[in-house]
Amino acid sequence: MKTCLIIDAAPVIRKIAFRLLSRDGLDVDTLEKPAEAFDWIESHGAPDLLIVAASAQDKTVVDEIKRLRERAGGSMHIVAMIVEANLGLMTRLKRAGVEGYLYKPFDRQSLDNGLRAFLAPERAVA
């Protein structure tokens, strides 16, 4: 079973993503802040997929993603949740190790489309 760690400050985003991905057979956990992921990875190992919220206002998220990538290695896919297509932020995130983007707010279809490449073939898309 593939594992997924969702990091977002908004409880409603964590709850919705948790429910949608759990129903698809993923082992999902959630955290509020990227800094909490270091201890999580230490105790659980790197997830197959890390979904982390990022914004231009958060000046630490790019560095935290880079450090998480270094700690977890290349086997962990990283997808950033963003609210707008900010080219500067997206470039910094890509350099830090982000492989894809998911726009908030999302629904089931956009979540499926945004994550399909990172979860196939284990996850069937409805």
Image: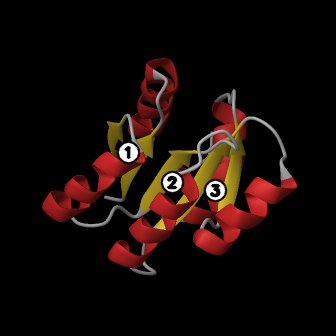
Any mark on residue 25, and which?
Answer: 1
Taking depth in this image into account, of 109 and 82 the one nearest to the observer is: 82
Q: Do the residues labelled 2 and 3 touch (CB within 8 Å)?
A: yes
Q: Name the residue under label 2.
A: 123
Q: Mark 2: few, some, or many residues within 10 Å (few <14, many ≥20)? A: some
The answer to whether 33 is drawn above or below residue 46 in the figure is: above
Q: Name the residue under label 3.
A: 116
In percent of width and height, residue 19 lies at 43, 28
Among all residues in the image, which is located at the extreme bottom? 74
Three-letter code, disc 1: Gly
Q: Mark 3 or mark 1, which has the lower sequence index?
A: 1
The reply, left or right, for residue 22 in relation to residue 61 is: left
Viewer-nearest of labels 2 and 3?
3
Q: Are marks 1 and 2 in contact (CB under 8 Å)?
A: yes
The reply, left or right, for residue 53 in relation to residue 95 is: left
User: Element under label 3?
Assistant: helix
The residue drawn where x is 23% and y is 53% is 40
User: Element under label 1?
Assistant: loop
Q: Distance between the residues labelled 1 and 2?
A: 7 Å
Q: Distance between the residues labelled 3 and 1?
A: 14 Å
In percent of width and height, residue 114 lies at 69, 50
Q: Mark 1 or mark 2, which has the lower sequence index?
A: 1
Locate the N terminus and report the quarter of the image it occupies.
bottom left
The residue drawn where x is 59% and y is 70% is 96
The residue drawn where x is 43% and y is 21% is 11
The reply, left or right, for residue 81 in relation to residue 88 is: left
